Image: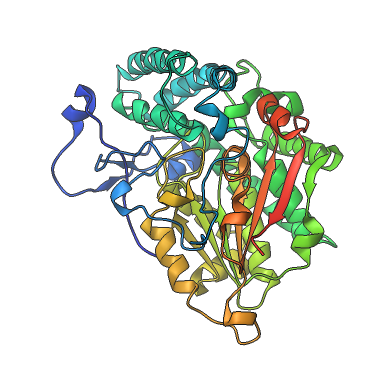
Amino acid sequence: MTTRYSTHAFTSTSSSSYLSSQRQSAPLTRRKSCHPQRGLMNKFAADEVMEVETISIDGSAKPSEASPFPLLSNKQPLYTHVSPGVCDMHASDVTIRAAWVVLLRSQHASHRANAKRTKDMFHEEDESFLDRYHEWEAKYDDFLSRVESDSYQGGTLLNVVSEKEKLLREYGLPDLFRAVKAAENALCSDVLFQSLRDDVDNSEDSLKASIEIALAGNLFDAGAAQAVQNVVGGTAFKGDSNKFAFKNSEDLQFAFEASRRRVRNSEWLCDDLDKLRANEYDRVCVFCDNAGADVLGMTLLARELAKRTKGAKVALIANELAALNDVTINELEEFYEACEQHDRNCLQKYRENGKIVLLSSGQSSTLLNLNTTGKDVNDWVKCEDTVSRSDMEGGKLRWLVVLDGMGRSLESNWECGKYVQPHVDVLNLAMVKSEINANRLGANVYDCVCKLSNSR
């Protein structure tokens, strides 16, 4: 099993009668939950953990251990996760809130389909699973009705999506997308990884190839299932357009190639690839987004960044707890282990010598609040940031923070670069997959973002 810098098992508590009946006072343990005859997907079953701490409204999986990300500056202006036109307007503008509610409600169909799939794969004996899902959906819809009302007294978009995760756990539904994540992680690690790795290694511009693959992988987002279907078409969604699921490796490969063509043919809202290429980074933090093709893209990008600079170290960072189809730290560890079986000279070697580490962000949200990152990632960053370089002004290592996907780099942290310390660059990397984000940014759906920024 991959060793993390430190080991913390976080999850949420709830006051509901269902979870109260399940909770025990014994020390936290992990239980592998594998369904018989599931083949490759067994090893990607997310670990079930007993509830130990309530997740926060700011996205932290374990608030008692959350603290600001060590690379943030303590000078004015102080960090905020708020992206202009998103979270800042959400609390005060009912029209903006109503538009976001439309987007959030559009995810219901995908939620239902994936709840059924997860129930069938991992919870066959749980007869109340789908009943609890429908109760949750009604409760969540009531909450969204309050959010879009004139009388709403809530906060930012991050607070709204965090409330959703809290409600899911109240109904004993911590990971609705567990099945689709397991299936796609298995397909991507055992089939797609080798061909894409070879594409990068054989490319005349391996960094560009890695970035294009990362952007293509970011398309595969259960929160934007319609955008995926519009690009992919074909046979991938036969029978149920809301399942966000691929029947086999051929479907997935077809879909990924369609997404790569879209990346090559789309406008790039921000294209700082040349600026990125001109820099070398000693330490890199990659905050991952979705499971499957997306985390595959991030793994290949981490591999490339680890190779580019002598002595470089890269941290692949994932949520502690599930949110939509975002990859969790447990899933990242298992996914990486499967990939490294096909790449012993790089991925396995890099993990063993510490050039690549796998860390928990301590988060439980589809957005990212760097004021509440967890002990796992913060301890590693603090330790590595004490290393000095004699050839650098001030002796500081050069850091790169990669923010993957709409939630972490567009809907939050769009201006993150101005809040970090001078020896740090921030790379916002995403495909625009929703009209609401496209309109706010003056972009088109499927435009790509490769934005490099800093406070210097």
Across and down, in percent, residue 288 comes to 55, 48
> Residue at the location (32% across, 55% down)?
8
Above or below 63: residue 324: above
User: Which quadrant does the N terminus fall into?
Assistant: bottom left
Above or below 102: residue 160: below
Could you tell whether 168 is left or right of 439 in the image? Answer: left
Q: How many marks?
A: 0
Instruction: Name the image quarter holding residue 283.
Output: bottom right
- Is residue 4 in sight in this rendering? no
Q: Work out whether residue 240 or residue 365 is closer to the camera in this orientation and state it.
A: 365
Across and down, in percent, residue 28 comes to 22, 48
> Residue at the location (72% across, 38% down)?
256
Above or below 60: residue 143: above
Q: Work out whether residue 384 or residue 305 is closer to the camera in this orientation and state it.
A: 384
Name of the residue lying farthest toward the left: 25
Instruction: Name the image quarter holding residue 155.
Output: top left
Across and down, in percent, residue 26 comes to 14, 46
- Is residue 61 in sight in this rendering? yes
Could you tell whether 36 is left or right of 110 in the image? Answer: left
> Residue at the location (55% across, 22% down)?
93
Name of the residue lying farthest toward the bottom: 390
Across and down, in percent, residue 294 comes to 62, 44
User: Which quadrant does the C terminus fall into?
Assistant: bottom right
Could you tell whether 193 is left or right of 128 in the image? Answer: right
